[in-house]
Image: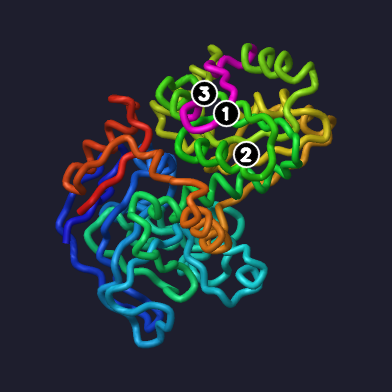
């Protein structure tokens, strides 16, 4: 089959690779019908995700049709159309019992690599390094899905791929980010980043009762998309001083009740020091996460406010104003998304017409064009916000 394969930093290619096979009786094999490029995939391309190996198949946002099922699979049969969570969970450990699926004890076959890099093992993740299981991803023609009865959800024939695909990651991630922000009716929520997760965090914050949502970004097409699909207020700059001053002005000096970091590890700095750190990281290929959004959030959030972090961080984060966070009594909530927890309720919202997640798509390309699509997405060319690939 054809698949998008990692060969090294800034080097991804379409290769011919062996078709996946059933390894465990709880597996299914999917024929991919739609797959997408996630912003966190760029962390892999940029070389800041450790334990990648040449030949790894990328991609963790995908859906498709069941073409083979293991003998112990009970929920699905050949021909079923399903969307798959990016997190892989066993369904039986203490974390799964508490619906903390991304912290699953059993789905990651490489716990020692995870512990060496993260301190503890967490769940396996499709197409996202060997510390997270070394599972083949879904930017391919076919993929093996472990623990099939725990992860995927059947998609009704009334919903298109465009409506359903983003249940795999970015819609639940944006929703959990808003949920973690502890939004109370009437609150003001500030969201850094209007990329795909940010877009769904904006939508979800309003769903959960926010009176005002303020979105911060400097990319015009992202800001315009957010405004087109909601009543969000915009700050069209990422300059540290400007963002702080505008937020204080918009909240009468109080600061937002909750702040969401939908940017993560590769935020861009606006100071000389920030640019120097970015350049050093680029030259030395260091797995450094950039602190610029966290810096702004810790200074801007109101006293006793809540900070939600869905943005992915890798390795160390230096130069954050932790004293401000401590003295202002900020609460932090973060983590990989417990996607399985949200699949049914969010599928119901789509089915009821409360949201159509397909609004996020700006580009459709064939799987063969995936390297070009990555380049387009990374460079933010041609007003690219979200790319969907079809085999």
Q: Disc 1 and disc 3: Cα gap in Å?
A: 16 Å
- Residue drawn at point x = 57 percent, y = 15 percent: 239
Cα–Cα span, label 2 and label 1: 9 Å
The numbered mark at residue 206 is 2
Marker disc for residue 246: none
Q: What residue would you read off at disc 3?
A: 217
Q: Position of residue 45 (x, y in %)?
A: 34, 40
- Please say whether residue 46 is one of the residues in the magenta stretch: no
**Residue 255 point in image, percent of width and height:** 75, 24
Q: From which residue to which does the magenta span run?
A: 226-241
For discs 1 and 3, the disc positioned in front in the rendered view? 1
Quarter residue 25 falls in: bottom left
Instruction: Write down the residue under mark 1.
Output: 231
In three-dimensional space, the C-alpha distance between marks 2 and 3, rounded to whole angstroms, equals 19 Å
Q: State the SS at label 2.
A: helix
Would residue 389 appear left or right of 101 to someone viewing this image? left
Q: Residue at x 41, y 62 (%)?
A: 84
* 236 drawn magenta: yes
- Sequence-first disc among 2 and 1: 2
Up-down: is 212 above or below 61? Answer: above
Q: Is residue 211 left or right of residue 78?
A: right
Along the line of sight, the residue nearer the viewer: 46 or 161? 161
Query: Is any part of residue 350 visible from this angle?
Result: yes
Counting residues from the start of the chain, the first of labels 2 and 3 encountered is 2
Marks 2,1: beta carbons within 8 A? yes
Q: Secondary structure at mark 3?
A: loop
Q: Earlier in the sequence, mark 1 or mark 3?
A: 3
* Residue furthest to the bottom: 71
């Amino acid at each position: 089959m054809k698949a998008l394969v990692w060969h090294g930093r800034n080097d991804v290619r379409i290769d011919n690779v062996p078709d996946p096979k059933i390894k465990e009786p709880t597996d299914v094999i999917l024929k991919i019908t739609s797959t997408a490029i996630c912003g966190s995939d760029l962390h892999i391309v940029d070389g800041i995700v450790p334990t990648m190996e040449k030949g790894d198949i990328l991609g963790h946002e995908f859906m498709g049709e069941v073409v083979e099922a293991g003998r112990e699979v009970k929920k699905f049969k050949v021909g079923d159309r399903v969307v798959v969570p990016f997190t892989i969970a066993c369904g039986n450990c203490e974390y799964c019992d508490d619906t903390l699926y991304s912290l699953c004890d059993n789905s990651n076959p490489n716990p020692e690599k995870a512990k060496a890099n993260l301190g503890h093992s967490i769940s396996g993740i499709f197409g996202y390094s060997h510390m997270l299981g070394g599972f083949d991803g879904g930017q391919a023609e076919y993929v093996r899905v472990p623990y099939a009865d725990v992860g995927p959800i059947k998609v009704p024939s009334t919903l298109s791929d465009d409506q359903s695909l983003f249940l795999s990651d970015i819609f639940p991630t944006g929703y959990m980010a808003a949920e973690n922000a502890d939004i109370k009716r009437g609150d003001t929520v500030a969201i850094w980043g209007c990329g795909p997760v940010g877009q769904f965090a904006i939508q979800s914050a309003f769903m959960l009762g926010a009176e005002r949502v303020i979105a911060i970004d400097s990319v015009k097409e992202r800001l315009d998309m957010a405004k087109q699909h909601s009543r969000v207020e915009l700050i069209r700059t990422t300059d540290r001083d400007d963002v702080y001053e505008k937020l204080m002005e918009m909240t009468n000096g109080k600061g937002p009740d909750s702040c969401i970091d939908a940017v993560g590890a590769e935020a861009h700095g606006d100071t000389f020091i920030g640019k120097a750190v970015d350049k050093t990281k680029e030259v030395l290929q260091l797995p450094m996460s950039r602190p610029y959004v966290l810096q702004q959030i810790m200074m801007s959030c109101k006293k006793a406010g809540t900070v939600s972090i869905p943005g992915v961080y890798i390795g160390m984060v230096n130069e954050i104003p932790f004293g401000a966070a401590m003295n202002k009594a900020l609460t932090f909530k973060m983590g990989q998304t417990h996607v399985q927890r949200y699949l049914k309720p969010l599928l119901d919202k789509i089915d009821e017409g409360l949201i159509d997640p397909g609004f996020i798509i700006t580009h459709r390309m064939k799987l063969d064009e995936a390297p070009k699509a990555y380049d387009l997405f990374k460079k933010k060319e041609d007003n690219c916000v979200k790319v969907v690939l079809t085999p």
